[in-house]
Amino acid sequence: MKPNMFRKLMNLWPPFLGAGIKVKNIDADFTTIDVELKQRFYNKNYVGTHYGGSLFSMTDPFYMLILMKQLGKDYVVWDKSAKIDFKKPGKGKLTAHFNITQKQVKDIKDQADKQKKVEPKFTVQVLDEEGDVVAEIEKTLHVRRKSPKP
């Protein structure tokens, strides 16, 4: 699927649509994805800032999706774990930028080919409009080569 169509479908996905999360850009080679979350009456928490679950949701699938697209159908890629560290209350428009370099993809592929599995870690920062870090999320993925079919 082409990046623009994939982006449009992601923006219609109910968990994102309901939370106000919007995928703004997916590069043609699927190595970079940009996401934003605008503050609305329906995604504020009790104290008037962004709901923490929405910050977490806006960062959930993207490293996994990038690696799936980069590695292709011969590999299994799953989210294994995640940790969020809230730095300050999030207000207004928040953004997150996801990127996995070609070198990182090659290293992960090489490790998965040599070992039973590899569990790379990635960190993404959620930024406010001033460029301040609102939250930092560490994602651990599980990657392995699929077993050949008999």
Image (cartoon, rainbow, N blue to C red):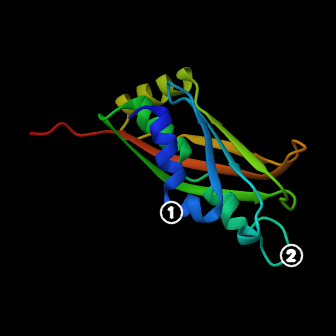
- State the residue at coordinates (55%, 56%): 81
Numbered badge on residue 14: 1
- State the residue at coordinates (67%, 63%): 54
Q: Are marks 1 and 2 in contact (CB under 8 Å)?
A: no
Q: Secondary structure at mark 1?
A: helix
Task: Give coordinates of residue 20: x percent, y percent.
Answer: 65, 59
Task: Give coordinates of residue 7: x percent, y percent.
Answer: 52, 41
Numbered badge on residue 133: none
Q: Is residue 119 visible in this depiction of the protein?
A: no
- State the residue at coordinates (85%, 71%): 48
Q: Secondary structure at mark 2?
A: loop
Q: Is residue 108 visible in this depiction of the protein?
A: yes
Q: Is residue 2 left or right of residue 59?
A: left
List the residue tagged with mark 2. Answer: 47
Could you classify mark 1 by the number of other residues whose Cα lies within 10 Å: few (under 14), some (14-19), or many (20 or more)?
few
Going by the numbered disc 2, the residue's amino acid type is Val
**Where 45 sits versus 78, above or below?**
below
**Where 130 sits versus 58, above or below?**
above
Q: Nearer the viewer, residue 19 or 121?
A: 19
Going by the numbered disc 1, the residue's amino acid type is Pro
Task: Give coordinates of residue 120: x percent, y percent.
Answer: 54, 40
Q: Quadrant of the C terminus?
A: top left
Q: Earlier in the sequence, mark 1 or mark 2?
A: 1
Residue that protrudes farthest toward the right in the picture: 130
- State the residue at coordinates (76%, 58%): 85
Residue that protrudes farthest toward the left in the picture: 150
